[in-house]
């Protein structure tokens, strides 16, 4: 939570300065729903719902601003419903929280519809299973008594789930959406992780070190860009809708 607060404070400090930049820059905010899953080599996971929220930047090139480059800074909840740590094999939430930084290229048609593609870099902030950040791992060792006979000793060790998950996730994104001249918009984006999340044993069959796990996220976003249109008379609004 402290990391999220610091991020939002930093964004609040940056936004006013960017809003004074040249006409091509547009600053806004996004809020939406995540439909996330982890594609796992050995488990039949199911998707789980989460949210994403944060500021967004948009810069349009040329007189009409049809081509644009954008950057988001989003707190994003990912993960899946998994039986990986469940003793009764029931599906429980495996929750991953990221600070996502998508960099995307966008083409906007004259009536407001846009297409986009780019890359997404996610920084892992927390990892939990069924609300817990640690799991118990049973360790079996064999020792020998004074008579030379083998003795099996079992002990438990607590392991942080975050330590078993890669801290940086790089992925590919594509999407489409619509932005009205008022600045309000809606969009859909699909993120496919390209980084194997497995770091150690969390996604392995019998913890053999062979598991592969990838983040997949479908996002539905509501967005608003400040000063998207120039305002004024009818002609200016039309021109403002074209120029970004």
Image: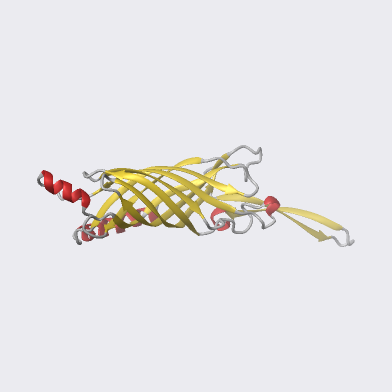
Residue 227 position within the rendered picture, expressed as x and y whole percent measured from the top left: 19, 50
Outermost residue on the front side: it is: 110
Q: Nearer the viewer, residue 156 or 220?
A: 220
Residue under the point 49% across and 44% down: 36
User: Is residue 85 something one can see in this rendering?
Assistant: no
Q: Nearer the viewer, residue 238 or 99?
A: 238
Question: How was this image coloured?
Answer: secondary structure
Q: Nearer the viewer, residue 86 or 76?
A: 76
Residue 31 position within the rendered picture, expressed as x and y whole percent measured from the top left: 34, 44
How many numbered callouts? 0
Residue under the point 51% across and 47% down: 79
Q: Nearer the viewer, residue 135 or 24?
A: 24
102 displayed left or right of 93: left
92 displayed left or right of 172: right
Q: Quadrant of the C terminus?
A: bottom left
Residue under the point 63% across and 49% down: 41
Outermost residue on the left side: it is: 233
User: Hey, which quadrant is residue 209 in on the image?
Assistant: bottom right
12 displayed left or right of 131: left
Residue 200 position within the rendered picture, expressed as x and y whole percent measured from the top left: 62, 58
Residue 90 position within the rendered picture, expressed as x and y whole percent measured from the top left: 62, 37
Vertical side of 130 occupied by 206: above or below: below
User: Hey, which quadrant is residue 44 in on the image?
Assistant: top right
User: Hey, which quadrant is residue 51 in on the image?
Assistant: top left
243 displayed left or right of 44: left
User: Is residue 205 something one can see in this rendering?
Assistant: yes
Residue under the point 62% across and 52% down: 203
Outermost residue on the right side: it is: 147
């Amino acid at each position: 939570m402290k990391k999220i607060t610091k991020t939002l404070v930093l964004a609040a400090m940056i936004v006013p300065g960017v809003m004074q930049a040249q006409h091509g820059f547009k600053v806004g905010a996004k809020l939406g729903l995540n439909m996330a899953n982890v594609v796992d080599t050995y488990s039949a996971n199911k998707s789980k719902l989460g949210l994403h929220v944060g500021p967004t930047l948009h810069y349009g090139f040329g007189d009409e601003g049809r081509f644009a480059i954008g950057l988001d800074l989003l707190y994003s909840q990912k993960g899946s419903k998994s039986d990986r740590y469940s003793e009764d094999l029931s599906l429980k939430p495996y929750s991953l929280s990221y600070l996502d930084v998508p960099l995307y290229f966008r083409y906007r048609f004259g009536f407001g519809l846009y297409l986009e593609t780019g890359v997404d870099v996610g920084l892992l902030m927390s990892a939990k299973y069924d609300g817990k950040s640690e799991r118990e791992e049973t360790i079996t060792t064999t020792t020998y008594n004074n008579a030379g006979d083998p003795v099996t000793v079992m002990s438990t060790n607590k392991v942080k789930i975050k330590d078993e998950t890669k801290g940086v996730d790089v992925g590919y994104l594509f999407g489409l959406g619509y932005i009205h001249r008022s600045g309000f918009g809606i969009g859909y984006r699909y993120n496919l992780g390209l980084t194997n999340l497995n770091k150690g044993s969390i996604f392995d069959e019998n913890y053999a070190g062979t598991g592969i796990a990838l983040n997949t996220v479908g996002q539905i976003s509501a967005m608003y860009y400040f000063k998207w249109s120039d305002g004024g008379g009818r002609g200016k609004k039309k021109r403002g809708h074209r120029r970004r």
